[in-house]
Image: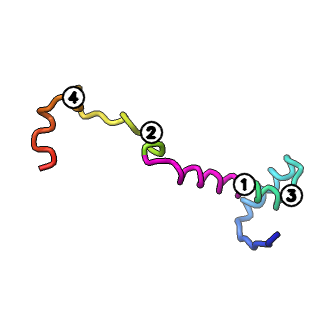
Amino acid sequence: MTTISLKVSEELVSRMDAVARARKTSRSALLREALEEKLKSAARKSSLSLFDQSADLCGCGNSGLGDLASNPKHLEGFGE
């Protein structure tokens, strides 16, 4: 295993120690677990399509036009 040096605030060390004590584990094990979770999450996010990443935003806007997607008059001049 490789050793890494890391600078963190005293407050973060206190919080980390409290969680490590509660889980009856070491700082190193806690940090390895947190890093692994973060990297897995980042990998999942990067493999998602743009739609998947923004699905919660779809339909959140309001144009005020109930027939925006179906009325041809709204498309006049589009793409010219």
The Cα–Cα distance between marks 4 and 1, rounded to whole angstroms, is 48 Å
Count neighbours of disc 4 (C-alpha within 10 A) and say few if under 14, some if 14 to 19, many if 20 or more: few
- Looking at the picture, how far across and down is residue 56, in whole percent? 45, 37
Label placed on residue 55:
2
Residue 64 in sight here:
no
Q: Which residues are magenta?
A: 35-50
Q: Residue at x 80, y 72 (%)?
A: 3
Q: Earlier in the sequence, mark 2 or mark 3?
A: 3
Q: Is residue 45 above or below residue 75?
A: below
The residue indicated by pointer 3 is 26
Query: Which image quarter: residue 13?
Result: bottom right
Q: Is the residue under label 4 in contact with that under label 3 (CB below 8 Å)?
A: no
Foreground disc of the pair 4, 1: 4
Count neighbours of disc 1 (C-alpha within 10 A) and say few if under 14, some if 14 to 19, many if 20 or more: few
Query: Which image quarter: residue 54?
Result: top left
Q: Earlier in the sequence, mark 3 or mark 4?
A: 3
Foreground disc of the pair 3, 4: 4
Determine whether the residue tagged by mark 2 lies in a helix, strand or loop: helix
Q: Amino acid at mark 3?
A: Ser
The residue indicated by pointer 4 is 70
Determine whether the residue tagged by mark 4 lies in a helix, strand or loop: loop
The Cα–Cα distance between marks 3 and 4, rounded to whole angstroms, is 60 Å
Q: Quadrant of the N terminus?
A: bottom right
The Cα–Cα distance between marks 4 and 2, rounded to whole angstroms, is 21 Å
Q: Earlier in the sequence, mark 1 or mark 2?
A: 1
Say if the magenta span includes residue 61.
no
